[in-house]
């Protein structure tokens, strides 16, 4: 093989390696809860202005208030790849097992929050439920973490996602205001709400656009590898009555 041929093959190999490295950063990824020390758990913090006092006052008045049980609740976001070279990227599942907050049926409202650095990415069972197949290589999972926390969500400046829900009732449409990346966007969400004994269970789904929250979906190689703007969200929230 002559020198020119070797140089051409080297350039092709380096180009392919670059594409693979960029593809590994195609979607958000965040650390596992098991890696967070107990003193750093979400229970120790609240978003600024979180209206916990409103619910305490409702309890004091003898009104029914439910407290969300994080360990029994789940919010799942499905992030999809796009672009001409989408096959080189990965779809991802981002989940929260730490949703916290309160529901007050008499006030027809609920307030919830999620700390972004407690999100978990690409759990095997959730990937299978989403039809995404096996978990991507660890490099792909690790490579996307910085994109999520840094240029995507700016989590250092905005560490929480908050959700304010109005018109809480036995089912049907809910008016929801989601604050993410410092931007609040209103949505109408179809949900099913069941009460069984002292427990309340709300489940449903919605689709959100990242651009509605001032987020620019990742796009590299002139758009050949992208993250879709639309993110599919599904949730099951379990809450238990707070004793007066």
Image (cartoon, rainbow, N blue to C red):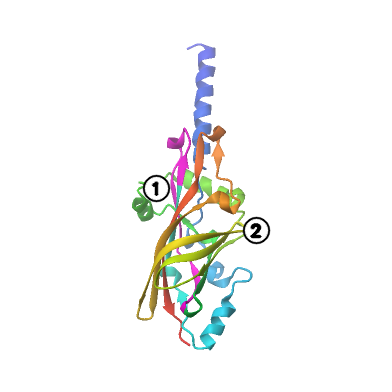
Q: Secondary structure at mark 2?
A: loop
Disc 2 to disc 1, C-alpha distance = 30 Å
Q: Residue at x 44, y 72 (%)?
A: 69
Q: Residue at x 38, y 77 (%)?
A: 199
Q: Is residue 184 visible?
A: yes
Of 23 and 178, which appears nearest the observer?
178
Front label number (2 vs 1): 2
Residue 89 drawn in magenta: yes
Q: Residue at x 58, y 46 (%)?
A: 216
- List x then y, in percent, for residue 187: 51, 59
Q: Quadrant of residue 155?
A: bottom right
Q: Secondary structure at mark 1?
A: loop
- Label whose residue precedes the other's in the sequence (2 or 1): 1
- List x then y, in percent, for residue 161: 56, 62
Total labels drawn? 2
Q: Quadrant of residue 3?
A: top right
Residue 133 drawn in magenta: no
Q: Is residue 234 visible?
A: no
**Residue that carries the numbered disc 2 in the rendered image:** 157
Of 163 and 188, which appears nearest the observer?
188
**Residue that carries the numbered disc 1 in the rendered image:** 135
- List x then y, in percent, for residue 86: 45, 37
Q: In the displayed image of the protein, which residue is found farthest to the top?
A: 2
Please report the bounds of the magenta region as a residue range: 80-105
Packing grade of label 1 (10 A; few <14, some 14-19, many >=20) is many
Residue 113 appears left or right of 200 = right
Position of residue 175 relative to residue 53, above or below, is above
Q: Residue at x 45, y 64 (%)?
A: 97
Q: Which mark is residue 225?
A: none
Packing grade of label 2 (10 A; few <14, some 14-19, many >=20) is few
- List x then y, in percent, for residue 210: 54, 50
Of 55 and 243, which appears nearest the observer?
55
């Amino acid at each position: 093989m002559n020198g020119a041929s070797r140089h051409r093959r080297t350039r092709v190999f380096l180009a392919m390696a670059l594409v693979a490295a960029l593809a590994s950063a195609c979607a958000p990824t965040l650390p596992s809860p098991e890696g967070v020390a107990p003193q750093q758990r979400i229970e120790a913090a609240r978003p600024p202005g979180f209206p916990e006092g409103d619910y305490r006052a409702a309890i004091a008045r003898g009104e029914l208030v439910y407290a969300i049980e994080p360990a029994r609740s789940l919010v799942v976001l499905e992030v999809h790849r796009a672009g001409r070279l989408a096959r080189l990227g990965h779809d991802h599942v981002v989940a929260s097992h730490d949703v916290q907050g309160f529901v007050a049926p008499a006030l027809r409202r609920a307030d919830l929050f999620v700390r972004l650095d407690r999100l978990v990415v690409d759990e095997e069972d959730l990937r299978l439920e989403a039809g995404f197949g096996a978990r991507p290589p660890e490099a792909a999972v690790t490579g996307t973490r910085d994109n999520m926390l840094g240029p995507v969500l700016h989590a250092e400046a905005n560490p929480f996602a908050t959700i304010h829900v109005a018109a809480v009732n036995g089912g049907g449409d809910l008016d929801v205001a989601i604050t993410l990346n410092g931007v609040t966007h209103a949505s109408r969400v179809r949900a099913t709400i069941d009460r069984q004994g002292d427990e309340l269970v709300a489940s449903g789904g919605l689709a959100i656009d990242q651009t509605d929250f001032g987020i620019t979906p990742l796009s590299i190689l002139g758009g050949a590898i992208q993250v879709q703007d639309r993110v599919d969200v599904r949730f099951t929230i379990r809450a238990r009555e707070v004793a007066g």
